[in-house]
Amino acid sequence: MIRKFSGLVFIILVFFITGCIKETYNMNKLSGETHLSPTIGVSAVKGDVSLSDLIKSDDQVIIDQSKFVRLIFKKDSVLELKMSDIYNMTDMVSFSKSYTLGELSVSPFDKTLTLTLDQITNHYSSLVKSLFVSKNNTTSIFPPLTPISLGEFPFPQISNFELAVFSVGTLDISVKNNLGAPISGINIQLYNSTGHTPIGNQATISLIQAGATGIATINLADATVSKSIVASVFITGSPGTSSPVVINLAVNNIEVGIHGKNMKVKSGRVVLPVQTIVSLDNRDTVDFDAGSGIELDELKIKAGNISYNVQSSSPLKTSLQLLLPTSNNGGLPITRLIDINPHTTVTGAISVSNTIIDLGTDPRQPYNRVPFDYSIVVTSDGSMVDFNKSDKIQLDIELLNPVIDYVKGYFGQKVETINSESLDLQMDEIVSHLTGDFLISSPSIKLKYSNSFAIPIEITLNATGKRQLKTVDLGLAPITIACPVTPSRRDVSDSLTIDKNNSSLPELISLPPGEVSFSGSAKMNPLGNNGLRNNYVFGESRFLGSLEVEMPLEFRINNLQFTDTLDNFIKNDNGNNDTPVNPEDFELFRLDLLIKNGFPLGAAIKLSLYDSVTRTIKSTVEAKDLLGAAPIDLNGRANGTTETETKIELTKEFFSAASKADKIIVRFTLNTTNSGLKDVKIYSDYRIDFNAALVLKPSINFKQN
């Protein structure tokens, strides 16, 4: 019983480090001195116990060089954020666009037909014809001619196309007068041979002097032209000459020419020459999307490829030239020439490894956007193709799973919730028996972290201590953590401390809690967008934090009570009255204690016999001054001992009541020096010297056989 009593006293003294109490108490520290009187049996127990006898130094209990005791609780990886937890940099680019080829140029053409004087005069009367025949191969006066239709004459076939619908272009009709006499005027109407459909309006050329050329122009906009063209020719006559000229029916002629130029075709069966399509803008942009509110300014890729898919719906052989002018790969921009056969799909990849890409050069949107230059060139082989201006080249681009070196920009005010974590202090059993006021004066929580997000991050850390139904919140204001500022420094290690100077931590710890729950959030860029876009995220960026709770044993106690209910260890459960000595045989059973206490902690004890069936207390014994608190210096360290003499008397009536109780309620009341008005500190060299004597007054009735 004495051993249980003394052990329980010291357990209460260190209740907040219960997980560190040694499993066994060294009984060798108890004195073995006992003696029996012939008339009164007296036993004595002496002990000398220090705090270091009861606790051991390990990773939770730290005893420093001055022997001051601190409790340490650690939790690794309470905060861990990787770049992939916050930002998706694996699928930022999805570009898809069709480029319509539009109207394309066709090569100019020239075709000429010749109408001899013989052919022309054949359309006049026989009298006029005979006159010119008589002057054939002579130098004579050229007779006048009256207006007449000469009929239709075919031009040589055009080789540039079989049939073409033009969007723009002109067709010059030239008439060279080689008759030797002026032509008063000439009208020409062009027709497609097939279907005899007119080409443009009739061309009229007025007076053409001998040896001169007259020209008229037809607009080919929206005109359909076939490879076979005929000309309907009407001359308004000739005044003839007043002077002799050479007249030769086979040599004198009119040369009618057609000259197509500056032509663009909308559709048709044509031969298209090599040409760069000029109807396109030749500049486009690829947008990067890393998430809502994120503005990327610069991107460096360690390894990766731009994958492309080019699909042609055109019968033309073409090539696509791509250029990323704001990319930098070894001092050169990224470029690629892609050859595309008619009606085919081409896939491939463009390496962007070790490339810096500037996403902030577009004045319309100086972020998340990369310009690229392109050109589409028709690389025709001279074959005839069926062309339409609506033919397209489809370009699809993706940047999948690049290995990011760093990304610069503004990464928004993203808020990440910190998952709730609980730290079990393994004190539930102890704190469930406590009442009264208790304050641990200088606890602290240290968050040690390494951070490689070069983004201002504001941490909101919530902590709640729980002791049964009572809770205390930490009350900590948000804290901005340290972060790297440039790509040259990519990691910062630091810590933040939470203590009585910035929170309600002492009140939280002093519940004392059986469990502390942690939660919170991390807010990026708490001050918002400053327009500088100077955040950096690295491919290996992460935030890793570990938690350390430190409780220096510096506290104050005012009437703290520890109550526990034990099985009645006094009660005789042998079930018979044959025991030679029973507690009822003693009129007096008294425990005399003399204790020299070196702890700045006083204690009282009260034992009550309790019947759990009737829920009544049968008898009570109490020692109001079991321990007197040791005096302390100005720093709260005990600087002496306090001697207390206590007598705990167990009367015959008490032992009689013990047989009627199945439980003993034990209540310890604790107070620190000065009744809890000043902080006291616990050192491992604090000691207690105690001397216990048992005083007996027997009242023995001998039984006769």
Image: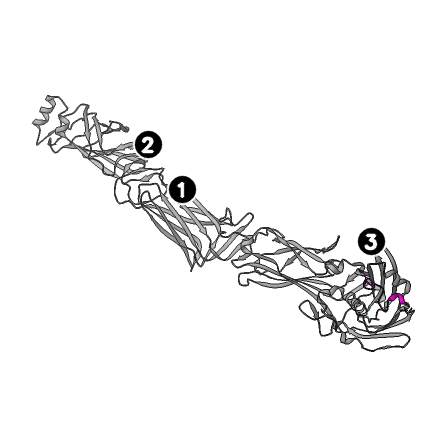
Density class for disc 2 (Cα within 10 Å; few <14, some 14-19, many ≥20) is some
User: Where is mark 3, residue-wise?
Assistant: 613
Q: Secondary structure at mark 3?
A: loop
In the image, which disc is placed on residue 180? none
User: Where is mark 1, residue-wise?
Assistant: 98
- Amino acid under label 3? Val
- Going from N to C along the chain, the mark reached first, 1 or 3, is 1
705, 190: nearer the viewer: 705
Residue 371 pos. (x, y %): 45, 49
In the image, which disc is placed on residue 222? 2
Give the distance between the C-alpha atoms of the residues marked 3 and 2, in whole angstroms.
Answer: 113 Å
Give the distance between the C-alpha atoms of the residues marked 1 and 3, in whole angstroms.
Answer: 90 Å
Task: Locate residue 601: give its quadrant.
Answer: bottom right
Residue 91 pos. (x, y %): 48, 50
Q: Is residue 288 left or right of residue 438?
A: left
Give the distance between the C-alpha atoms of the residues marked 1 and 2, in whole angstroms.
Answer: 25 Å
The rendered magenta stretch, by its main secondary structure, is classed as loop
What are the residue bounds of the magenta stretch? Answer: 568-586
Residue 578 drawn in magenta:
yes
Residue 509 appearing in the image: no
Residue 100 drawn in magenta:
no
- Amino acid under label 1? Ser
